[in-house]
Image (tube, grey):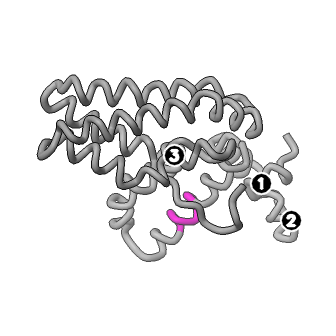
Amino acid sequence: MFAQGPVELTCLAHIRRKFFDVHAANASPVAEEALRRIAQLYAIEQLAHDMTPEQRLALRQQQAVPAMADLHTWLLATQRTAAGSGMAKSIDHALKRWPALQRYVTAGHLPIDNNPVENAIRPIAIGKKNWLFTGSDRAGRRAAAIQSLFATAKLNGLDSARWLAETLEKLPTCPNSTIDSLLPFAEFTHN
């Protein structure tokens, strides 16, 4: 498998976006073909969604490895005819990242893209401009604490709004010595 430590992966969604932009700009049939080939890889991942990492790896080895090899061969062949175009830039972008792009097919636990991470941090990225104007440093610290508690509840599989409502009900009668029992950790929840 892999040695301990970071493993470079390239996000297939970012590679796809380059081809999507070319297709949106000029309805390029070549970009459309790239999108079709990438869609095949995502269809394989959809089949693997509920599989164990071992099962996912077996499926990837059987189906995604040949699809990636075909995509690579097609990109190399298409690169020669697309020189100087927006399509060529999209192809170059993919080929420069090819070793890290195809790495996900070598293990069942590696993701095909980083969309889940981007979706998780999107509210923070969108909200950060709004949070610049919380009114005061003290209000900013409170907002940060509340956001941290909500994120912790969510990561522990709790309904954040329900956790907050239950906590606000319990808070007035909770002794200071047991205040930690109100934190949004699944093991502390008794419901």
Q: Main secondary structure of the magenta part?
A: helix
Closer to us: mark 1 or mark 3?
Answer: 3
**Would residue 145 be counted in the magenta stretch?**
yes
**First to last magenta residue range:** 142-147
Write down the residue under mark 3.
Answer: 102
**On the rendered image, what quadrant is the N terminus found in?**
bottom right
Q: Secondary structure at mark 1?
A: loop
User: In the image, which disc is placed on residue 178?
Assistant: 2
Place of residue 63 in the rendered image (x, y in percent of width and height, measured from the top left):
59, 27
Of marks 1 and 2, which one's residue comes earlier in the chain? 2
Which one is in front, 91 or 56? 91
Tell me if 78 is positioned left or right of 47 in this view: left
Query: Local crowd at mark 1 within 10 Å, few (<14), some, or many (≥20)?
Result: some
The kind of residue tagged 3 is: Gln
Query: Which residue: 21% across, 41% down?
Result: 80
Write down the residue under mark 1.
Answer: 185
